Image: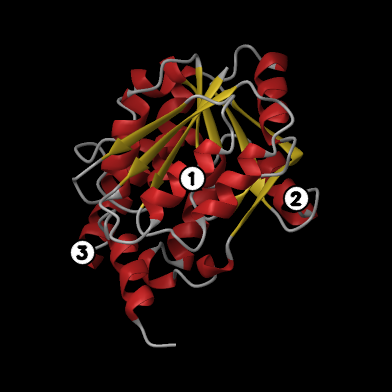
Amino acid sequence: MITFVIPYFNEQDYLGETLASLAAQGDRRFDLILVDNKSTDRSAEIAREAAAAMPDIQVQFLSEDRAGKLFALRSGIAAVGTELLGTMDADTIYPPDYVGKTLALFAASPKCSGVMAFNALGETVSVSKWLQVRVRPDHCHTGGYAQNFRTAAIKAVGQYDPAIWPYVLEDHEILHRVLEHGPVIYAKDHVCRTSDRRDDRTDVSWTLSERILYKLLPQSRMKWFFHQFLARRFEARGLSNIRLREQQWQSDQSPE
């Protein structure tokens, strides 16, 4: 079994389709934890309607009043009772074989600490992205929309915690802590599809030079990279984890 944690904030335009893709999974060995992070739209109602359409799946509904994805993830992961867990985003579509492939990759690599999937338009990841994985298999090549971990490993490193990492790119930072407990596995045909609203996040993410340095440094230098180098730069630019939420809210309020 694996438990998927999905935090959401005002996702009424996307959440229903995401949960419908999970309802269509061929492998039913999963639970869901849906964490409402102070939504003010119909997201919570949509979540319960969608869950009712899959009565064979155990679904927990949680509310996290502290604003920010880190708090929602932390609450959700604390409630996980299965050996494996995955984080998902509320605006992502998962193919019908997503659960089956995730569990199969864990079973095939009993010493791994995680299994990752890619954001891809087709059935496989691009050649360039796969080459990056081959060169740096111990780096993050995906996001929180498709990261799966052994529950004991992510909890052993403190999971998501603002006291450890209060900034954006939490999905990259957490992976390098979890790697202390074993490698992560990628497969070129293990994919999902995120929404197109992610196209421009340049003002809430790292710079090109920071990204290049990340790709060049070995895993042994990641603690320095995140907690000494990048943390200072993110602090100076005000890139706290809640910044992405604020950008989303401002976009939702903008006139069409």
Q: Quadrant of residue 157?
A: top left
> What residue is at 49 percent from the left and 63 percent from the top?
13
Please rate how many residues cluster around mark 3, counting C-alpha atoms within 10 Å: few if below 14, some from 14 to 19, many from 20. few
Q: Quadrant of residue 47?
A: top left
Please rate how many residues cluster around mark 2, counting C-alpha atoms within 10 Å: few if below 14, some from 14 to 19, many from 20. some
Residue mark closest to the camera, 1 vs 3:
1
**Mark 2 touching mark 1, by CB under 8 A?**
no
What's under tag 2, amino acid-wise?
Val
Residue assigned mark 3: 236
Mark 2, secondary structure of its residue = loop
Q: Quadrant of residue 73?
A: top left
Q: Is residue 56 above or below residue 64?
A: above
What's under tag 1, amino acid-wise?
Glu
Nearer to me, 85 or 229: 85
Nearer to me, 123 or 175: 123
Q: Position of residue 188 (x, y in %)?
A: 76, 41
**Mark 1 touching mark 3, by CB under 8 A?**
no
Label of residue 125 in the image: 2
Residue assigned mark 1: 49
Mark closest to the chain's N terminus, 2 or 3: 2
> What residue is at 35 percent from the left and 18 percent from the top?
156
